[in-house]
Amino acid sequence: MPSERKSLLYFLSMYIFLVIIILLLVSALYYNFRKDLMFTQIRPKLAENAKDVIYRIKEMHQSLGADLHYPRFSGFKSAIYDADRVKIFSLLEEEDIRFDKVIYKTGDKIRFIKEPDAYYLGTKYLIIEVLDDERWLRETVRDILTFGGLFLIFTAFLGFFLAKLFIKPMRESFLLLDNFIKDTTHELNTPISAILANIETIDKNEINEKLAKKIHRIEIAARTISNIYQDMSYLLLNKKTVSNIERFDLKELLLQRISYFKILAQSKRVDFVLNIYEEVYIKADRKKMAKLIDNLISNAIKYNKIGGKIYITLKPRLMIIKDTGIGIPKDKINEIFKRYKRFNESEGGFGLGLNIVYMIAKEFGITIEIDSKPDKGTEVRLKW
Amino acid sequence: MVRLLITAIILVSFSKGGDIYHQNCVNCHKIYGPSLKKLFFDYLLVYSSERRVKKALFEYMKNPDPKKSLMPKEYIRQNGVKKPSKLSDEALKKAIDSYWNRYKVIGKIK
């Protein structure tokens, strides 16, 4: 059930995406909260330091330039800048000051910017810088990892149950559909076999021509249904059928299948033109090869023009089935082997045929080449 | 002709900012005005940066406004304000540059 897996994948990726977004958002908020808390805690100390520096530069100012020894303290570094943000004096190692902030962190340092009440020595901005021991950061990371991990485990469990809940109705409907098709297919077999068997037992010489014509049509219809039945049962039971590989003459099988389709072809006045070599052998499962040929011939009839032709060539390691039908648009050739793909809504069918052809060809190492021209016809070449 | 020559000589000798500052500011302040050093630090205290201090000085020299004077009101009432400077804009700017370089603190703090 690939579509089920696909939906589950969509659901899971969306879920994981959302969980990660939530986790990142909460982590970012928590980080900012812890940072602000740290700033609030350290700020009074920094303000105290700023006061000491301002006291000293006020003294320097009042000395009218006689005493210009800048204060140096052991716990912090400082710098002074004027109103045009030009450096007056600095003890800092890096001088990229963010003047729009009051307190901020750069690298492993915290900077606090204080504006003195008057511009002593021209100082508008006093920057106090201390080293951040980053204990708060380690604690924050530890908290985020711990609680984030717990959250992830919780959401993983939740996601698991949600996915199960999400899949349940889908799985049920799949099972329902699957069983329905299986049952229907099974129930189709007996009546179709009965119809076909009974038609064969009718002696065409005993009945009048009008009735014979009607019975002929019934036979064509029954065979069409029979083909659909066979396609469906092949696909549904495909995994369970084991191939019985043998080396056999393909010519015999091909002629047998052509004769089977003669009646159907005649109903559209389609003629077969054969070019068949003797003794063309292939190693494959006889029943599956018959199915492959059936599907190709049935398509060649179905999509042919009234009064068209089907050219069938069989040479060693090559079989060509060519029709004079409606053809396949160039842009759709790549899609024709997909299941349920149909190109002409006017014709019946489920779009299973070429998908089956593709599966069988793949199993026996047969390559398929398709040439098609709209309104000219389609040529299918099988090589092995 | 002689007059023109004398004017030219005076102009050339005045073109050095230091001389303009000494002849037009220091000489007079030494006798009448308040201390230039004290004034410099007052300007620094109020205007902070080089650009702003120079701009304020220039405007005050051109148009001495008692409201803009940094001297105490009592001083203004007793002495009034100075007369507008007769120096050209360029010369005045040179004098102010000399003044700034004489007392600036940037580069002198240790």
Image (tube, rainbow, N blue to C red):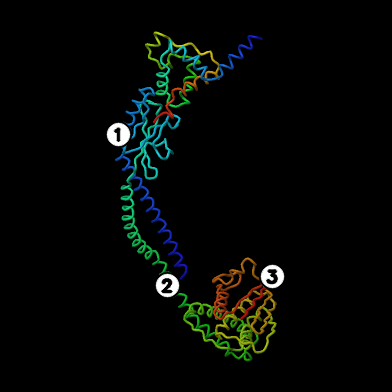
Mark 3 and mark 2: span between their CA atoms?
A: 42 Å
- Chain to which the residue tagged by mark 2 belongs: A
Which residue bears the numbered disc 1?
A48
Q: Residue at x 40, y 20 (%)?
A: B42
- Same chain for labels 3 and 1? Say yes or no: yes
Using a 10 Å C-alpha cutoff, classify the residue at mark 1 as few (fewer than 14 neighbours), some (14 to 19) or many (20 or more): few
Q: Earlier in the sequence, mark 2 or mark 1?
A: 1
Using a 10 Å C-alpha cutoff, classify the residue at mark 3 as few (fewer than 14 neighbours), some (14 to 19) or many (20 or more): some
Going by the image, does A113 lie left or right of A352? left
Type of amino acid under label 3? Asp
Q: Residue at x 34, y 34 (%)?
A: A72
Residue B58 screen position, x and y as percent: 49, 19
- Give the residue furthest to the top: B78
Mark 3 and mark 1: span between their CA atoms?
A: 93 Å
Q: Earlier in the sequence, mark 3 or mark 1?
A: 1
Judge whether A343 appears above or below A158 on screen.
below
Which residue bears the numbered disc 3?
A375
Residue A137 screen position, x and y as percent: 33, 48
Q: Earlier in the sequence, mark 3 or mark 2?
A: 2
Which residue bears the numbered disc 2?
A175
Quadrant including the C terminus of chain A = bottom right
